[in-house]
């Protein structure tokens, strides 16, 4: 058991040391080892790459590890129990928050939807969960924090939560239950209690470590590509290349980005190279974030899966409400960071 | 007859879990059938909320998780006749 604590205890100080020294390490590697001169396009790009890749990967590892431990305290079954019979609004707030910390894979969206609705979780509350879960995830937050700062990450998380809360609330108020396929409400699913074994803290650490293995192994390549793109076009593509198309002055850019984003499907990491490139070249933050939200939060493949349980009208309303929410957030960001 | 059921409608982890079951059974030299249940209504009847679900001899063991190899081996050993 002892060696379960050993790993984090050794790695944490090492992590901190590396993170704090990253600046000087990058200096050393770029200017001393590679012998590049300060200030040139190429050496700037290389320094940027050498500095950003380990920085973002370090952040990602730590956050995914911590989130992995937090998630071991939650399960969809337990979340359902907490949401059962909750009133609108309170339920929407809780569902959105739980959506962030409950382990969720969009491939399980259908069983989860059915399980929630059939056991009496209100439709609008269920939607709040389904909107928040994919949109606000740890990978997106780490990347935004690492590349654009904590303000951007915080704004993304809080506005994402607001969209989930309000969209779910509106769907709840509209009383759209009759747009759910009839058979859904005819079957009552039993709330089976999977025998939950008591998990010890070392086992939670294990859960954190396996989350790191799984997620970092999956997304590191996108991060490297993203940062390489960022470094590569630094100074080689005209600075305001995207400004006319996606800058603040183009008022139609936000809705257009959302429209383009809906049919696209990508995980948070995969979209970052594009976000990085757009921002670097003069696209405004609100427009780019709206694009990112609609790509990872509203995906056509997922909504097509939902067709099995929802009528097309409800899917349309769902996309419409969330889409409008994202557009408002886009304008808000553009306004704040003007 | 020992029956292992893997519930899931085709996600990557569902296929992986099914394969892991075959491997574990072979390793343990245990004779059991492995069934993949993909029908949505059948999945919902079990009450699980996330896939893959793992059922051994009628007992739901886990859902939404891909266990490690050694955990899976333990589960099988504990629940097999």
Image: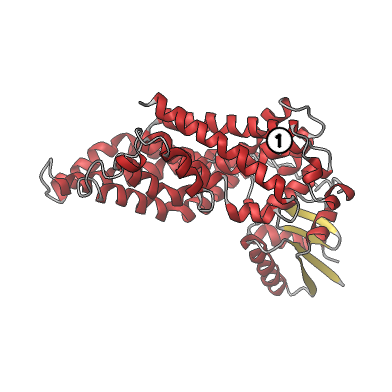
The answer to which of A163 and B12 lies nearer the viewer is A163
Quick check: A182 above or below A86? below
Q: For residue A324, what is the image quadrant?
A: top right
The location of residue A296, given as percent across then percent down, is 53, 46
Q: Residue at x 73, y 29 (%)?
A: A91
| Quarter of the C terminus of chain A within the rendering | top left
Quick one: SS at disc 1? helix
A271 with respect to B72 (left or right): left
A182 with respect to A78 (left or right): right
The answer to which of A122 and A331 lies nearer the viewer is A331
Quick check: A229 above or below B27? above
- Chain letter of disc 1 in the image: A
Q: Residues within 10 Å of mark 1 (few under 14, many from 20)?
A: many
Q: Residue at x 36, y 38 (%)?
A: A147
Can residue A181 be seen in this snapshot?
Answer: yes
| Quarter of the N terminus of chain A within the rendering | top right
Q: For residue B74, what is the image quadrant?
A: bottom right
The location of residue A260, given as percent across then percent down, is 48, 49
The location of residue B68, given as percent across then percent down, is 63, 58
Can residue A154 be seen in this snapshot?
Answer: no
> Disc 1 designates what residue?
A171
């Amino acid at each position: 058991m002892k060696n379960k604590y050993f790993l984090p205890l050794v790695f944490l100080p090492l992590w901190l040391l590396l993170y704090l020294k990253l600046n000087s390490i990058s200096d050393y590697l770029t200017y001393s080892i590679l012998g590049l001169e300060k200030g040139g396009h190429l050496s700037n790009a290389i320094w940027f790459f050498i500095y950003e890749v380990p920085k973002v990967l370090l952040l990602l590892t730590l956050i995914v590890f911590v989130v992995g431990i937090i998630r071991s305290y939650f399960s969809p079954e337990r979340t359902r129990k907490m949401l059962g019979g909750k009133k609108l609004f309170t339920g929407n707030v809780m569902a959105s928050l739980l959506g962030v910390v409950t382990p969720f894979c969009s491939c399980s969206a259908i069983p989860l939807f059915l399980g929630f609705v059939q056991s009496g979780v209100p439709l609008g509350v269920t939607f709040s969960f389904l909107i928040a879960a994919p949109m606000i995830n740890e990978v997106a937050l780490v990347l935004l924090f690492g590349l654009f700062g904590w303000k951007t990450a915080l704004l993304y998380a809080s506005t994402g939560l607001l969209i989930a809360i309000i969209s779910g609330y509106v769907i709840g108020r509209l009383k759209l239950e009759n747009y759910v396929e009839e058979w859904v409400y005819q079957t009552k699913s039993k709330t089976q209690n999977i025998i939950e074994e008591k998990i010890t803290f070392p086992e939670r650490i294990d859960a954190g470590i396996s989350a790191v293995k799984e997620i970092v192994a999956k997304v590191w390549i996108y991060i490297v590509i993203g940062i390489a793109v960022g470094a590569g076009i630094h100074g080689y593509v005209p600075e305001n290349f995207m400004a006319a198309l996606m800058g603040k002055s183009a008022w139609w850019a936000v809705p257009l980005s959302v429209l383009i984003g809906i049919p696209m499907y990508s995980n948070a990491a995969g979209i970052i190279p594009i976000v990085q490139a757009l921002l670097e070249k003069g696209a405004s933050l609100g427009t780019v974030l709206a694009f990112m939200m609609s790509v990872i939060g509203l995906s056509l493949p997922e909504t097509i899966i939902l067709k099995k349980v929802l009528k097309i009208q409800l899917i349309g309303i769902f996309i419409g409400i969330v889409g409008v929410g994202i557009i408002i957030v886009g304008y808000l960001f553009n306004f704040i960071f003007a | 007859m020992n029956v292992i059921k893997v519930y899931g409608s085709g996600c990557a982890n569902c296929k992986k879990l099914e394969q892991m079951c075959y491997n574990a059974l072979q390793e343990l030299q245990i004779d059991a059938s492995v069934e993949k249940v993909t029908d949505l209504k059948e999945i919902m009847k079990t009450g699980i909320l996330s896939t893959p679900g793992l059922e051994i001899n009628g007992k739901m063991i886990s859902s939404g998780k891909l266990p490690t190899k050694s955990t899976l081996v333990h589960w099988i050993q504990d629940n097999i006749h």
